[in-house]
Amino acid sequence: MKKVILAVVAPLVVACGAVAQQRAQGDPNVLASIMVMPRFESSSALRSLLDQKCKQGNKAYLKTYSIYEEMLSEPTWDYHNEELFKVLVQHASTASCLNENERMRPKALLEIVNKNAPGTVAGDINYETLDGSRHQLSSITTPYTLVYFNDPECLSCEKVKQRLDTCTTLRKMVSDSVLTVIGIYPYDNVDEWKQENFPCYLINGWDYEQQVEGQLTYDLMTMPLFYLLDRDKRVILKNEASLNCVLRVLTHLDGKNFKDIDEMLNYTWLWSITPRVLEMGRKINE
C-alpha cells in the first residue's frame, strides 16, 4: 500500500489557474535569483522576501507562499530545493500575518521537512536482499551512499533503472569504493520486487520491516527518489528525483575533503541547482 505524504492538511489557497497566472508575473525569476546566491545568503534572502510579503499583508504573503511551496517541494520541478522549502515552511508556521488556521499546514509540513533534512543523519533502514540476508543502511562504510527508492510498478523507475545500468560514473565510483548504491523497495509486493533485475553494481534491498511506509521514516513524494548521504549517513541530497542532479553533485564531491557537513553543503549548493534555473538566476543577478 502506498501513501500520499503531503496531503496533511487542506491546501492554503489558490486554484491552479491563479497559480499559473502568478507564475507569469515573475515569481519564478525572483526565486531563481535567490537560489543562485551562496547557501546561507540564499536562505537569508528568502526570509527577507517573506518578511516583506508579510508586511504587505495576508493576501500578498499567501500568494507568494502558495507558489513557492509547490515549486520548492515538488521533486520533479527545476526549482525543487529542500533547504529553501524548510525556510519557507518555518517562516509560514510563525508568520504574524497569518491566522492560526492558515499556519496549520506549514506547521504540519515542518514535521515532514525536518525528517532527514540536509545536514542531519538519515533514518536507518533495515533491508533484505534477494539472497535472504539482512543488513542495515548504517553499516555501509564507503564515503558516500546513494539510496535509490524505487517501485517495480513505477514506469519512471524503469526508465531511471535503464540509465543506472549504463552509468559509467556510478560504476566507477562503486568500483573505486567511493560510493555504495543501494536500491530500496519500501512497499509490500515482495513477489514483484523479487522479479526485478538491477545493475550488478547496485544493491537491491527491500524494507522488510516496512518502516519507511508504516512509520513514515522517509518522505517519499514520488518515485523514484534519491537520497545522497556522506560517510556518517548525513543527508547531502534529499528527495531528489533527478539522476542528472545526483551525478553533478557526486562528480564535484569526488576527491574533495571537507571539515564538516556545512562546508560540504555550501560547496555542493550550486551544483544541485538545475542548469536552466542557474542560468536564469545568474542573468537576473547580473
Image (tube, grey):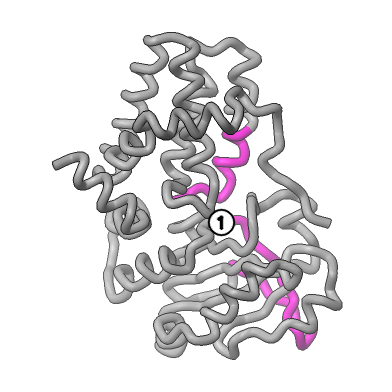
Identify which residue is drawn at 43% across, 43% down. 83
Q: Quadrant of residue 251?
A: bottom left
- The residue carrying mark 1 is 122
Instruction: Tell me the element at label 1.
Output: loop
Q: Determine crowd level at label 1: few under 14, some 14-19, many 20+ residues with C-alpha closer than 10 A.
A: many
Q: Does 70 sit above or below residue 219? A: above
Identify which residue is drawn at 59% across, 87% down. 199
The residues colored magenta run 109-138
Quadrant of the frame with the C terminus:
top left
Identify which residue is drawn at 59% across, 33% down. 16
Front residue of 226 and 26: 26
Identify which residue is drawn at 73% across, 81% down. 129
Q: Does 208 sit above or below residue 15? A: below
Residue 260 appears in the figure: no
In the image, 142: left or right of 253?
right
Residue 268: x and y in percent read 32, 58
Residue 279: x and y in percent read 25, 52
Q: Which amino acid does label 1 sit on?
A: Ala
**Residue sitting farthest toward the left:** 286
Whether residue 135 is in magenta: the answer is yes
In the image, 284: left or right of 80?
left
Front residue of 107 and 284: 284
Q: Does 119 sit above or below residue 158? A: above
Quadrant of the frame with the N terminus:
bottom right
Residue 155: x and y in percent read 68, 69
In the image, 279: left or right of 100?
left
Residue 238 appears in the figure: yes
Q: Looking at the image, how many numbered discs can be counted on the residues?
A: 1
Residue 35: x and y in percent read 32, 43
Whether residue 202 is in magenta: the answer is no
